[in-house]
Image: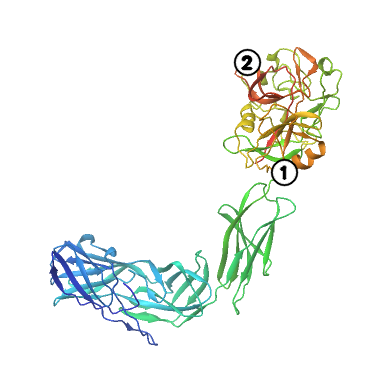
């Protein structure tokens, strides 16, 4: 069905044509129930329109007829061999006709398609009886026409009667009195929807509702919504409004002055747990806004927070959780209408913890990332204080140094036996300086199968309060597992393609780990990903390390050497090899998993050391 029209009288004849049945329909033009004239409106068929025809004596005998023509006159064709005669009935649209319990049931739908300056397809139900060689189509409905102009884009209009009338439902037809169907209502509103939006302007545009004939005893209310479903204007009447079957009732033109609300960008404060929400609104002349603010919260659980009435407007939210996504939506109130802006989200930053290098490193296929500590771990015996070395290239012990049995000759320790966290976690030897005895003395929690993170986690050095790493016990520092060491070196991908290089930093050999977001333009490096077996391809002084590498999140692991359990007082390999504990036990009960590198080799996954060996510890903490 095409352009606006009513009083639909279709003259139909039936004939056979090469095995097909055809009917011809002529539409009578509409009349108006308006005080002002309605000119130039025609109800026309369109190509593809379908009607459904029934034999009143046998409702299982039915056929669908389709037209390929258009205009006031159209011919409908069916592939069936139905011979239409007196006693046959037809309905439009055919999708809305059903035959429950042997009766005809034609729906007037609660949702109708809106089209500017006409009424939408299939919203105007019609019925027809066959008499004197023709069908005559009628409708039990009338049309309410609302003329609109102004600003804004309409997504839908919801119409309801002020006296609680039923506005949609099912028409039931008796075959002996088709002209007087009864309506069984099931909804007291009708929604006219505009799938692509109805853009308002200074030019008047008319929209149409298909409604049951009758009287709005106390007038009606039409709520006009934008494309987001938010109310922008309400049209109301209080006097009786009569809908006449097969007539158009035209309302006076309505000027929609739509208030627009914009949800602005959220701005972070000096700390990541403080954010300023921003919004603004636009209001046509003569329309006032009485309240502004934001809906704010997590997910869909939003709370309303009014803001100072100004334009633009803002609201500060404090005490938010770090690294958390929040949702917010600006609003403005005009009279009884609340106009909403778009729904937006932001995620608070995570403050960089004390003691970390600000570079993120992916450690597994799930994409989890960690920060590295600013330097290797050390312990001062005389004060019982754990700390990170001030510089990444710092060494405590030197090659060939005799630290004495049980570190008797040295107060500061940085080459630890496995699990010597200082906590009595169930091993026979757990003091930070202990690197002598049997490897079985270092079993975490006294069990050869346990890892440092098993049981209560106290066997991991990261459980300690580290003086320049937050100075709080169990604050998130931990050892990498051996699988995470391997992923760092061998598997993760970076935009630059560089994961690590061997280097000499401030005359200390070692390995530089490049963060996930490393850009090759930060500093030119050679022997990428361990391509050549030598430290000297990348010789870097202390200032360059700080300004060009560490400032961009790069981590340096110095070759700090080791101490053997059988020769615990002697430091070996410092400035020649690096060995770093993992938190993982080994399948070989005599050894524990560690990451090892030298000038010619790198073994991040499958190196084992005895638990009573003294080697380096570099802690990490989860970045998320």
Image position of 454 (left or right of 430): left
Which residue is identified by label 2? Answer: 589
Helix, strand or loop at mark 1: loop
Between 507 and 402, the residue placed more toward the observer is 507
Residue 413 appears at what percent x and percent y? 81, 24
**Residue in the picture at 51% in, 63% down:** 228
- Distance from the alpha carbon under mark 2 to that under mark 1: 44 Å
The image position of residue 498, as x and y in percent, is 65, 37
Pointer 1 residue: 522
Q: Say whether residue 225 is visible.
A: yes
Q: Is residue 409 shown above or below 198?
A: above
| Front residue of 16 and 508 | 508
Q: Is residue 477 visible?
A: no
Residue 224 position, x and y percent, is 48, 71
* Mark 2 or mark 1, whichever is nearer to me: 1
Q: Nearer the viewer, residue 263 or 49?
A: 49
For residue 554, above or below residue 145: above
Q: How is the image coloured?
A: rainbow
Instruction: Classify the position of the C terminus by image quarter.
Output: top right
């Amino acid at each position: 069905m095409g352009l606006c029209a009513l009083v639909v009288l279709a003259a139909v004849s039936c004939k056979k044509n090469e095995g097909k049945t055809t009917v011809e329909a002529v539409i009578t033009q509409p009349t108006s129930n308006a005080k002002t004239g309605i000119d130039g409106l025609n109800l026309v068929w369109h190509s593809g329109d379908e009607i459904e025809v029934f034999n009143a004596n046998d409702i299982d005998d039915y056929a669908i007829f389709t037209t390929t023509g258009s205009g006031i006159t159209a011919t409908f064709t069916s592939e069936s061999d139905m011979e239409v005669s007196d006693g046959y009935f037809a309905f439009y649209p055919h999708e809305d006709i059903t035959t429950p319990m042997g009766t005809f049931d034609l729906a007037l739908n609660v949702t109708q398609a809106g089209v500017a300056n006409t009424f939408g397809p299939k919203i105007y139900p019609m019925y027809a009886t066959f008499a004197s060689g023709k069908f005559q189509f009628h409708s039990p409905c009338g049309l309410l026409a609302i003329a609109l102009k102004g600003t804004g884009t309409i997504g839908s209009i919801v119409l309801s009667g002020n006296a609680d009338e039923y506005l949609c439902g099912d028409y039931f037809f008796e075959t002996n009195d088709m002209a007087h169907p009864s309506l069984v209502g099931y909804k007291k509103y009708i929604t006219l929807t505009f799938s692509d939006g109805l853009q308002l302007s200074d030019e008047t545009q008319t929209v149409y509702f298909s409604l049951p004939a009758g009287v709005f005893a106390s007038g009606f209310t039409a709520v006009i919504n934008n494309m987001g479903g938010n109310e922008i204007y309400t049209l109301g009447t209080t006097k009786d409004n009569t809908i006449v079957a097969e007539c158009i009732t035209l309302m006076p033109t309505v000027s929609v002055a739509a208030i627009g609300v914009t949800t602005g960008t959220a701005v972070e404060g000096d700390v990541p747990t403080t954010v300023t929400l921003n919004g603004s609104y636009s209001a046509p002349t003569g329309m006032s806004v009485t309240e502004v603010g934001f809906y704010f919260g997590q997910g869909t659980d939003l709370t309303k927070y009014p803001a100072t009435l100004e334009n633009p407007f803002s609201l500060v939210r404090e005490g938010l959780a770090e690294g958390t996504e929040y949702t917010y939506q600006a609003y403005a109130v005009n009279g009884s209408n609340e106009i909403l802006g778009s729904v937006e989200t932001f995620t608070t930053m995570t403050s960089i913890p004390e003691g970390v290098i600000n570079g993120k490193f992916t450690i597994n296929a799930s994409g989890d990332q960690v920060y590295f500590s600013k330097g290797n771990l050390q312990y001062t015996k005389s004060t019982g204080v754990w700390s990170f070395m001030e510089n990444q290239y710092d060494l405590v012990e030197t090659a060939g140094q005799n630290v004495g049995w049980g570190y008797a000759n040295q107060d500061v320790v940085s080459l630890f036996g496995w699990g010597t966290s200082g906590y009595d976690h169930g091993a026979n030897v757990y003091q930070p300086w202990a690197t002598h005895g049997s490897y079985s003395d270092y079993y975490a929690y006294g069990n050869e199968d346990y890892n440092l993170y098993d049981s209560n986690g106290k066997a991991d050095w990261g459980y300690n309060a580290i003086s320049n790493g937050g100075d709080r016990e169990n604050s998130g520092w931990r050892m990498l597992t051996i699988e995470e060491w391997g992923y760092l070196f061998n598997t993760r991908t970076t935009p630059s393609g560089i994961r690590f290089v061997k280097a000499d930093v401030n005359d200390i050999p070692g390995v530089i780990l490049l963060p996930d977001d490393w850009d090759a333009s930060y500093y030119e490096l050679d022997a990428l990903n361990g391509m050549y077996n030598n430290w000297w391809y990348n010789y870097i002084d202390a200032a360059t390390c700080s300004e060009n590498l560490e400032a961009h999140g790069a981590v340096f692991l110095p070759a700090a050497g080791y101490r053997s359990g059988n020769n615990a007082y002697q430091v070996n390999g410092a400035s020649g090899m690096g060995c770093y504990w993992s938190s993982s036990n080994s399948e070989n009960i005599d050894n524990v998993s560690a990451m090892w590198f030298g000038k010619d080799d790198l073994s991040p996954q499958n190196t084992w050391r005895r638990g009573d060996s003294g080697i380096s510890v570099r802690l990490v903490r989860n970045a998320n």
